[in-house]
């Protein structure tokens, strides 16, 4: 009975198709119509510009803390391109590219970061879940959604996102283990952007790759160049195909980089070098995709200029709409339960009396008066 | 009409739910092949199949976490935590998401699920199988907390909880599962969540309780009547959220005296809330301080010592007499 | 003597602890290189090294779970939850083990750890960064729950919590981290856990609060005095477990009127407990119902709406006047 | 950039040394003194007899529900043999063999199942943690203990146990991930007894082995014949060695079988076949070890008879001592905090008044009087 190595059924693979110089592996290049290539390029550009504008808004104090996704556009956009409208999209919090692709109006995204539930309210009929703040907790409901699709036999799949840091959470483990047991059609994208706030990837886990965590659940792991939208689409398509055929979940590690701050409350200079950031600059997913669509003749310089202008205008219009939004201050009472129970009716009465007493103005502990005029119009 | 234990009555409610509503699904550890460690899911796997009655791995956070996702796809999950003592593993999913999705999405994504949890002491079980923590769920906005006390209301309330559009923590007094039987009508029966029951009328003192503690309360009421000629009015809350303050106030205004009884620890427990509400609405009717007969603010002792640490008839009688003789 | 913010005062306490007691260790997300998302651990990694100030992965259950084991080996862990809203991930470790090991092993294995958690609203943060759930910890037997309100008591109470032989949930009002400064003595200072402070004497009404809510309470007291010639007596609880009922009773017996203020939801919240204790010990002194100025039993709104949902001076004044004019 | 397989640094191995017919792989056979072989054989026999007697006590109503460990004696005993007294032992709930080996008196074990904290109180100076009820939660404090040993530089290691079912829990994942990151000297034994109450191993996770979960944490995995005490000792020794040298944690999957009920509250006939149980009977760890020690001449038939008799007497004496134990009813008040706070002093007064009022007798909701005479002696 000599000591023997166990041959594992699972393997971990690496996929990259479009490199930073625009070279393409023709054997793996996914088929995408020119029209879709244009739409994808526009979407990626929109995500980038949206992020930049949000950082400005934050500096101007027009929204709250903001968490940009600069540099992660391909990792987030590719996977949702590979699914249908009726499939489910389950984001973490760094997927504006995917969220916009799924059809969320820009104003909703702005309003989320402005502190409004309206920004967490999916558009009509959308099979999308809003931003999830507690790291990795979304893996669980993503697994449930995918399993639900299987039980309902509606042919749907779910694409969900989690960060590298999120793989340390128990919810990641339990969710993926259950998804694998139940054969749930779930594609989990780990956006490995190398950092969990200030914790580098190496200190989050001692494993060589994040993709290999799939082996723990009896799955194959894929490590994909996350700044390569073609590879992301290729890998997700394969996983979606398998999932639809009953082949169960897939874990895709998208290797990318958080080019910006964790959030605007954070100063990355405290924990990482400019050199590291510089290394990643040439790997920019947008620049790379531009080389590809340009070479294909799908988007010209001119198209691009026009696109950029349209996008800026769209964002400006969305900001204007967002800034006109006035929340109804009574909504929290209306949406705690389907029907307001007696104790909340009483507390609502108390709340209204308070709003009335303040004549639309309330003072804060730090002495800043805050105008409630916008609220009082809802009182009658 | 059949004489059923609470275990059988709950099983009946689950069976009816699976029959009536094809979107329902039962999930939990050992609920299928093994029919539940308390046999609450007896025969259900056999009759409804493995897609409706799902044996789940040992991962409580996932039981409730995956249930959220099922809800979004139009499935109605009825989750079983094997013991409430392990429900805490899923606390974050319940606090962070289940209680919040309706508010977060202004009603677009909701979690109309039931989480059944056997709670409480009295069955000589090992550690973590005997505490009562309903107050922590009652404290979380967005959850309903329902606690039956007998076979008939258990069946009706479970049916109502399953039909409810909001998440319900359904706390089952495991000591009552097989302790006694009751007539349970054959026809489906439901009950409004949030209505307490005056289970005995009386004029000398109001005794408020719920769940497993109703039994010592009933015993105490007999003793108060027989030994001390005191007529206690007994209120069975049946749900902590919503709390039926109207029934409470009507009784306390009548008797002017009140005892609240539960197994849960005292500090920030349900009795504290009930007392606060009485003070807010009926202070002027109070003729004596309100007594709390509750678990002590202690870790529940291992079972060889648990008996004297639980509310019992003697404690309730002592408290009621103290209140009356004030 | 230096004028310090609460953030700096907490940093000072941590620095002193690391200096004075070589068995102490700080662990949490981003507490090292990044010096904490609120900069509470500023300079500590630099001065004490990576074995004493540990950057932890995103795994809250492990922060407290591993801390248990450290305790058994003679280390004194000071854990940081980045936000109390993520402390629930470790709820089961806290309930199942941290609160119980002393009792379980009759004092042989104990968990003398501190779990620091920034809580509460008021900093315009995203979801899950603004709620107050101290009541759930206060309900769990075996835990102490300490909540400072200003720089000086924050430093002294954190020192006391670190020295305490039992697990302490140290709830930090994040809205106060940098809101104001206070004189903090240079020499190490500690405070007894479980003693409330009468921060202002008065005879018309007792206002009881703690943590972040002390600021609107102080503001309200000024307004009550200036506008309505009412002298409010203000009690800062500083700890919920143990609760200093002696100070509460002395005041309420004097004023006969009381308002309790906190951000946490009302149902089964700390105010309920305080009211229940007052009823038990001082009912006959009450001249009016006790008012609760608390968070509503609602999911905390996203920040654009949070302001009117918090206790503020106006609400406290309304409540105090109602109690006085009863 | 063709799709390529990633070569993983980690491997999974299988180890077995002593087979069920008594054949030994001489190359791997661990060195154990004759004296120790005798002690080990006695310990394994004791564990078996203890279990049998506990099942009887339970049937007689003299203890509460009991969870036997029949058939898992080698998996539990081997690992603790491989560590020193000063190292740490962190059990789950199915390790009486290890607990007795660590020097816990039999009465403590009986008293635990009789519902007394005294049974959870480690003997003086022991580096042992008591039974852990919440599945897998012990992995976390085990990781903490091991990490503590490393920080204290005391050379200690921790051996901890978890069930196959326990690997589905988030605590398993987080604990092992952290242990690996911190290089904690932790040896985690997964007692894969094929069942988590009624859930078979196959339904707990879709992974081929449990050992391969190590790969998720950047560790090598070992799958060991858990009914082979020599293999368990060999594997644990190797892991302990590595851990002491700073090589970090190891996961060992001990492949064994739960020969009996989950607990006495359970009826395994509902979910598994007699055939399956029969298959495992010839693999009995005790029978196998007997072949080994007999062949070595270390224990003779006669020695064994004497041993069996001593063991039965020891157990009988322990039962008698355990049954004389009367808990102090006030202890829960004394051990909630180091010092009793005021509110508990008041509740204690209330409690004493109640005990006094009942004159040492209290009635239960189900009408069973329970004698508290044993308690009242503590009242003064
Ligand atoms: C459960 C939980 N713990 C802590 C936090 C605070 N937090 C927000 S983001 C973050 C780091 C997440 O890192 P990663 O998963 O890699 O995502 P990234 O921010 O890099 O996109 C932390 C610790 C949180 N939101 N949720
Ligand atoms: C957190 C938690 N969930 C559920 C239970 C109830 N329970 C006790 S043992 C058990 C099965 C454990 O299976 P495994 O880990 O394989 O250990 P085994 O019983 O086979 O030794 C369950 C679900 C528990 N004790 N703890
Ligand atoms: Mg990251
Ligand atoms: Mg098992």
Image (cartoon, coloured by chain):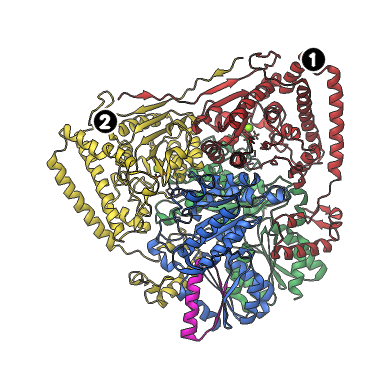
Chain colours: A red, B blue, C green, D yellow
Residue B225 in the magenta stretch? The answer is yes
Q: Residue furthest left?
A: D302
Q: Position of residue B260 (x, y in %)?
A: 56, 72
Mark number displayed over residue A297: 1
Q: In which image quadrant can residue D361 be found? A: bottom left
Residues D225 and D270: in front is D270
- Residue at image point 54% right, 63% down: B154
Q: In what element is the residue under mark 2?
A: loop
Q: Chain of mark 2?
A: D
Check the image and report above or below for C53 versus D23: below
Check the image and report above or below for D110 versus B316: above
Residues D139 and D5: in front is D5
Q: Which residues are magenta?
A: B206-235
Check the image and report above or below for A31 versus D243: above
Q: Which quarter of the figure is the C terminus of chain B placed in?
A: bottom right
Q: Residues within 10 Å of mark 2 (few under 14, many from 20)?
A: many
Q: Position of residue A287 (x, y in %)?
A: 75, 20
Q: Position of residue D336 (x, y in %)?
A: 46, 59
Q: In which image quadrant can residue C144 be found? A: bottom right
């Amino acid at each position: 009975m000599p000591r023997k190595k166990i041959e594992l059924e699972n393997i971990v693979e690496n996929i990259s198709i479009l490199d930073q110089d625009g070279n393409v592996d023709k054997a793996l290049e996914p088929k995408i119509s020119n029209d879709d290539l244009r739409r994808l390029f526009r979407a990626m550009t929109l995500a980038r510009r949206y992020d930049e504008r949000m950082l400005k808004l934050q500096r101007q104090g027009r929204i709250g803390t903001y968490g940009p996704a600069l540099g992660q556009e391909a990792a987030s956009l590719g996977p949702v391109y590979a699914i249908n409208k009726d499939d489910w999209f389950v984001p973490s919090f760094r997927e504006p590219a995917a969220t916009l692709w799924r059809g969320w109006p820009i104003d909703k995204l702005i309003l989320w970061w402005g502190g409004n539930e309206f920004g967490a309210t999916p558009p009509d009929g959308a099979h999308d879940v809003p931003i999830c703040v507690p790291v990795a907790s979304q893996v669980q409901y993503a697994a449930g959604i995918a399993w639900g699709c299987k039980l309902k036999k509606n042919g749907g799949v779910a694409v969900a996102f989690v960060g590298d840091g999120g793989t340390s959470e128990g919810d990641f483990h339990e969710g993926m283990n259950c998804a694998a047991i139940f054969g749930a059609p779930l594609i989990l994208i780990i956006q490995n952007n190398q950092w969990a706030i200030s914790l580098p990837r190496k200190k989050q886990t001692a494993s060589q790759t994040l993709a290999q965590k799939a082996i723990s659940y009896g799955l194959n792991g894929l490590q994909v160049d996350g700044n390569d939208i073609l590879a992301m689409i290729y890998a997700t398509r394969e996983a979606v195909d398998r999932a639809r055929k009953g082949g169960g979940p897939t874990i895709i590690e998208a290797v990318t980089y958080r080019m910006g701050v964790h959030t605007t409350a954070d100063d990355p200079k405290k924990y990482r070098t400019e050199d590291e950031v510089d290394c990643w600059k040439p790997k920019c997913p947008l620049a790379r995709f531009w080389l590809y669509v340009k070479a294909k003749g799908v988007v010209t310089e001119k198209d691009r200029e026009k696109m950029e202008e349209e996008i800026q205008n769209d964002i400006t219009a969305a900001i204007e709409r967002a800034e006109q939004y006035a929340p109804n201050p009574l909504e929290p009472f209306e949406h705690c339960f389907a029907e307001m129970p007696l104790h909340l009716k009483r507390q609502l009465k108390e709340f209204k009396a308070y709003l009335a007493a303040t004549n639309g103005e309330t003072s804060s502990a730090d002495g800043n008066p805050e105008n409630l005029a916008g609220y009082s119009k809802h009182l009658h | 009409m059949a004489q059923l234990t609470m275990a059988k009555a709950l099983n009946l409610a689950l069976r009816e739910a699976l029959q009536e509503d094809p979107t329902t699904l039962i999930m939990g550890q050992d609920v299928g092949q093994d029919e539940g460690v308390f046999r609450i899911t007896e025969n259900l796997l056999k009759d409804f199949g493995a897609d409706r009655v799902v044996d789940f791995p040992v991962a409580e956070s996932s039981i409730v976490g995956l249930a959220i996702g099922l809800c979004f796809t139009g499935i109605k999950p009825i989750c079983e935590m094997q013991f409430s003592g392990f429900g805490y593993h899923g606390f974050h999913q319940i606090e962070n998401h289940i209680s919040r999705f309706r508010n977060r999405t202004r009603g677009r994504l909701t979690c109309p699920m039931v989480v059944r949890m056997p709670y409480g002491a009295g069955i000589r079980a090992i550690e973590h199988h005997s505490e009562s923590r309903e107050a922590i769920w009652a404290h979380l906005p967005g959850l309903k907390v329902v606690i039956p006390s007998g076979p008939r209301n258990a069946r009706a309330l479970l049916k109502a909880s399953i039909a409810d559009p909001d998440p319900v923590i359904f706390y089952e007094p495991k000591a009552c599962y097989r302790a006694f039987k009751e007539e349970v009508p054959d026809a489906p029966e439901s009950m409004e969540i949030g209505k307490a029951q005056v289970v005995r009328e009386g004029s000398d003192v109001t005794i408020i309780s719920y769940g497993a503690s109703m039994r010592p309360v009933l015993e105490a009421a007999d003793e108060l009547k027989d030994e001390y000629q005191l007529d206690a009015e007994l209120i069975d809350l049946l749900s902590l959220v919503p709390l039926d303050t109207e029934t409470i106030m009507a009784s306390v205004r009548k008797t002017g005296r009140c005892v609240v009884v539960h197994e849960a620890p005292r500090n920030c427990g349900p009795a504290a809330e009930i007392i606060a509400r009485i003070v807010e609405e009926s202070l002027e009717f109070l003729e004596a301080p309100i007594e709390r007969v509750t678990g002590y603010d202690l870790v529940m002792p291992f079972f060889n010592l648990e008996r004297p640490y639980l509310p019992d008839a003697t404690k309730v009688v002592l408290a009621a007499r103290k209140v009356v003789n004030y």
